[in-house]
Image: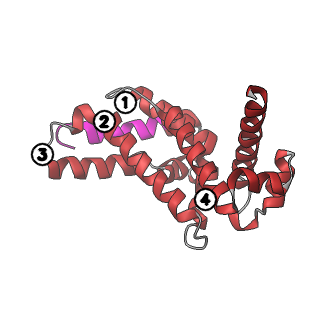
């Protein structure tokens, strides 16, 4: 029984990995269950047995990736240098896929909850990472700084520096750190 349960979990993980991998290169609307099944080495029926529907598969994939992202970006509160380093590492691995997902938001209903979850997770990361500076501030000032820190550390900021300006990874990290440290000063 234990071997069977482990086999089912391995199959589930392969299907989720295949779904995520396909979504990093193609529009969600262009990914059929047959594509996922083929990439995972299973049948469409197996995908449906595991997840119930395409929507269930997308939700499970979103949950799995959100947990991975949270782990990739986990940093101690107040560790600005490590936080920015981990964030840029994350964008180097996933930034282009995130941008592809964001581009689909106005046209693909299934993307909206995924993108909203990402926005919420990013804001929570900002609040946790920069808590030592943000917590003592009055509520209105804390909200303003949190908004600005979220912008300074957003995937679009990475894109502007890394893709549009063509800066290397180190310079991109350096400029994002400069933005953040400027906002963390008492009087930005």
**Residue 126 disc label:** none
Extreme-left residue of the structure: 138
Q: CA distance from mark 1 to mark 2?
A: 7 Å
Q: Earlier in the sequence, mark 1 or mark 2?
A: 1
Which SS type dominates the magenta stretch?
helix
Range shown magenta: 173-188
Q: Nearer the viewer, residue 119 or 180?
A: 119
Disc 3, SS: loop
**Residue 130 disc label:** 2
Q: CA distance from mark 1 to mark 4?
A: 27 Å
**Residue 138 disc label:** 3
**Residue 80 disc label:** 1
Regarding residue 49, the answer to whether it shows in the image is yes
Mark 3 surroundings within 10 Å by alpha-carbon count, few (fewer than 14), some (14 through 19), many (20 or more):
few
Instruction: Say whether residue 175 is magenta.
Output: yes
Disc 2, SS: loop
Give the residue at x 50% y 54%. Answer: 156
Answer yes or no: do the residues labelled 1 and 2 have beta carbons within 8 Å? Answer: yes
Which label lies toward us, 1 or 3?
Answer: 3
Residue 34, by quadrant, is bottom right
Which label lies toward us, 1 or 2?
Answer: 2
Give the residue at x 37% y 26%. Answer: 76
**Residue 101 disc label:** 4
Answer yes or no: do the residues labelled 1 and 4 have beta carbons within 8 Å? Answer: no
Mark 2 surroundings within 10 Å by alpha-carbon count, few (fewer than 14), some (14 through 19), many (20 or more):
many
Q: CA distance from mark 4 to mark 2?
A: 27 Å
Q: Position of residue 133 (x, y in %)?
A: 23, 34
Residue 58, by quadrant, is bottom right
Answer yes or no: do the residues labelled 1 and 3 have beta carbons within 8 Å? Answer: no
Q: CA distance from mark 1 to mark 3?
A: 21 Å
Q: Earlier in the sequence, mark 1 or mark 3?
A: 1
């Amino acid at each position: 029984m234990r071997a069977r349960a482990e086999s089912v979990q391995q199959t589930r993980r392969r299907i989720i990995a295949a779904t995520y991998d396909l979504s990093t290169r193609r529009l969600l609307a262009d990914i059929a269950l047959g594509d996922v099944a083929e990439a995972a080495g299973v049948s469409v029926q197996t995908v449906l047995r595991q997840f119930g529907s395409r929507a269930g598969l997308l939700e499970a994939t979103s949950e799995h990736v959100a947990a991975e992202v949270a782990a990739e970006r986990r940093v101690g509160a107040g560790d600005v240098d490590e936080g920015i380093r981990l964030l840029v590492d994350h964008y180097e691995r996933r930034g282009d896929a995130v941008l592809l997902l964001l581009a689909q938001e106005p046209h693909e209903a299934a993307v909206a909850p995924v993108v909203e979850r990402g926005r919420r997770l990013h804001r929570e990361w900002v609040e946790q990472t920069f808590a030592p500076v943000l917590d003592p501030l009055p509520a209105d000032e804390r909200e303003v700084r949190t908004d600005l820190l979220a912008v300074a550390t957003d995937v679009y900021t990475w894109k502007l520096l890394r893709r549009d300006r063509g800066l290397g990874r180190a310079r991109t990290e350096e400029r994002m750190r400069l933005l953040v440290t400027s906002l963390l000063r008492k009087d930005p």
